Amino acid sequence: MVNNRKRNVLLTAQRLFTEKGYAATSVQDIIDESKISKGTFYNYFSSKNECIIAIIENAEEETALKRREMLVQQEIKNKDILIKQLSVKMEFYRERNLIPIFVAIFHSQDSDLREVIKRNHYEEVKWLATRLVDVFGEETKKISVDCAVLMLGMIQQVQHPWTVKSRQISVYELVTYVLKRVESIIYDMVKSQDLLIDSYTFNHYYDDVQVTKGEVILQLNAFYKTHKIDLKVKEQQLIEFLLEELNSTNPRKFLLETVISSFSNSFDQNTLDQQAKEISSNLWKIIDSIG
């Protein structure tokens, strides 16, 4: 938790970032406005970047707390609670005037700050995907990430001030409207299994577990040996190719990329689907490490 003095520094920095812009605000500006010493600032933050990251993290922490409190003694399937949970974040960010800061970071060339925004968006999609499953049922799990991305995208576009000029639209009204649109397509997506984003890979994108090529080869080999009798000829061929290529001195990245996708998709709606997705996720990590 943030102590009161540190919180005041964060609020001052936030105001300056909004008024002057992130790039134009210096650490000295924050020190002067906060009426603290340079030593105190650097006791709290190692840099201006760390300061703005703390602002974002505090906002996320407060939002998560508010959202969790809304579920106390409430039915998780209640659509109105989901609408209020989505609305509370938007209202909170508007009240704290945080949106200009996000926009400034998004358009900056600072890779560390852009990664913070990317991670922030990732966590929001992941949270919403989970809540959509709560509301619409376990059968929507595979397409929940797609629906979460669509829903957040619609909310973002509709709330732009130039989108609707005829009247003011409340956050609650906006979110309610978008949720109704998602509700009208979600079960059709379940039926058609028309997926754009693989939910397993998405949900494990930021996993910190490091895997080696040798470990993935062992994992794929074990999968092959355990289930060979149940595998179709095409599935066996895909696995054999992956193993051969991974064991080669110079694995061909472009071929592995194509074959991994075929391998992962071949187990859709199959009892081995989750195992295949886990292996595919690890394979992609190895692919990304190949120069």
Image: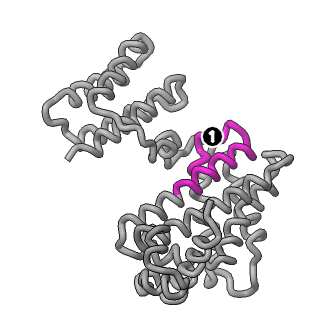
Residue 183 location in percent, x, y? Answer: 72, 53
Q: Residues within 10 Å of mark 1 (few under 14, many from 20)?
A: some
Residue 234 location in percent, x, y? Answer: 35, 24
Q: Residue at x 44, y 29 (%)?
A: 276
Q: Nearer the viewer, residue 132 or 117?
A: 117
The chief SS type of the magenta part is helix
In the image, residue 176 lies in the stretch drawn in magenta:
no
Q: Residue at x 69, y 48 (%)?
A: 131
Left or right placement of residue 58 versus residue 221 in this view: right
Q: Residue 136: in sight, yes or no?
A: yes
Instruction: Give the quarter of the figure containing the N terminus.
Output: bottom right
Compared with residue 199, is residue 95 higher up or lower down, i.e. above or below? Answer: below
Q: Residue at x 55, y 67 (%)?
A: 56
Q: Nearer the viewer, residue 61 or 215?
A: 61
Q: How is the image coloured?
A: one colour
Compared with residue 15, is residue 281 higher up or lower down, i.e. above or below? Answer: above
**First to last magenta residue range:** 122-146
Q: Check disc 1 and report its element: helix, strand or loop.
A: helix
Left or right placement of residue 65 versus residue 41 in this view: right
In the image, residue 124 lies in the stretch drawn in magenta:
yes
- Determine which quarter of the picture holds residue 109: bottom left
Q: Residue at x 67, y 69 (%)?
A: 90
Left or right placement of residue 248 versus residue 160 in this view: left
Residue where numbered disc 1 is placed: 141
Considering every residue shown, the one lying at the far top of the view is 229
Residue 37 location in percent, x, y? Answer: 47, 80
Q: Nearer the viewer, residue 24 or 103?
A: 24
Q: Nearer the viewer, residue 9 or 178?
A: 9
Compared with residue 245, is residue 141 higher up or lower down, i.e. above or below? Answer: below
Name which residue type carries label 1: Lys
